[in-house]
Image (cartoon, rainbow, N blue to C red):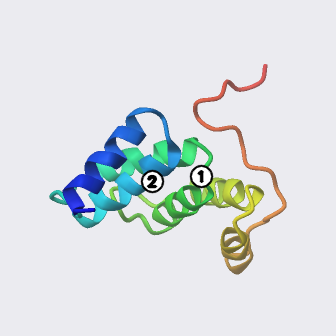
Amino acid sequence: MADADALRTYEEHAAKGDARGAYNLSVCLARGVGTAPDRTRALRYLRAAADGGLPEAMAQLAYLYWTGRGGIERRDEAEAAKWWRAAAAAGDADAAAQLRRRGLDASAPPPPSSTEAAPD
C-alpha cells in the first residue's frame, strides 16, 4: 500500500473513532509519511488514540509530556505520569518500567481523564 493510500485509510478509521487508526495516523503525520509533517494534527490524533484506550498511544503521549516534545508546549511530569500509569494499567510493561525508572509510583491509579467529570 502506498503511503498516501495508507494515510487515507488511517484517516477513515480515525474518523470512525478507531484508536488504532488514530494512532497510525498520528505516526504518519508526525513523520511526514504520505503528507507533510504536521505536529499539531499528529498530537491531536495521538491524544484521540490514548483517550480511546490504546496503551502504546498512552505511553507515547506520556513520553511527549515528559520531554516537552512533539507539539507539547511545556514539560508536564504529572501528566506524563498519569498517561504512563494508564498505559501500565492497560498492560504496557514498558510504561510500568518508565514509571519505576523515574521513581514514580506505578501502582497508583491514574487520575480521571480531563474528559471525565470530577466527583462531587
Q: Amino acid at mark 2?
A: Tyr
Between 73 and 20, the one lying in front of the other is: 20
| Residue 65 seen in the figure | yes
Q: Residues within 10 Å of mark 2 (few under 14, many from 20)?
A: many
Residue 72 in sight in this render: no
Number of numbered markers: 2
- Tell me the tag on residue 23: 2
Residues marked 2 and 1 touching at CB (< 8 Å): yes
Image x and y of residue 18, in percent = 50, 41
In the picture as drawn, the residue positioned furthest to the top comes out as 120
Q: Which residue is mark 1?
A: 54
Decide if residue 93 is on the left or right side of residue 38. right
Per the image, label 1 sits on a secondary structure element best described as loop
Quadrant, the N terminus:
bottom left
Task: Write the residue at 71% across / 26% down.
Answer: 118
Q: Nearer the viewer, residue 62 or 68?
A: 62
Dot 2: element: helix
Task: Pick the residue in front: 87 or 115.
Answer: 87
* Residue 47 place in picture, x, y as percent: 47, 46
- Amino acid marked by disc 1: Leu
Residue shown at 73% from the left, 68% from the top: 104
Question: Residue 111: which numbered mark, if any?
Answer: none
Residue at mark 2 to residue at mark 1: CA–CA distance = 8 Å
Pick out the residue farthest to the left: 36
- The answer to whether residue 9 is left or right of residue 87 is left
Counting residues from the start of the chain, the first of labels 2 and 1 encountered is: 2
Of all residues shown, which one is farthest toward the front?
1
* Callout 1 crowding tier (Cα within 10 Å): few <14, some 14–19, many ≥20: many
Q: Is residue 12 above or below residue 119?
A: below
Instruction: Determine which quarter of the picture holds residue 70.
Output: bottom left
Q: Quadrant of the C terminus?
A: top right
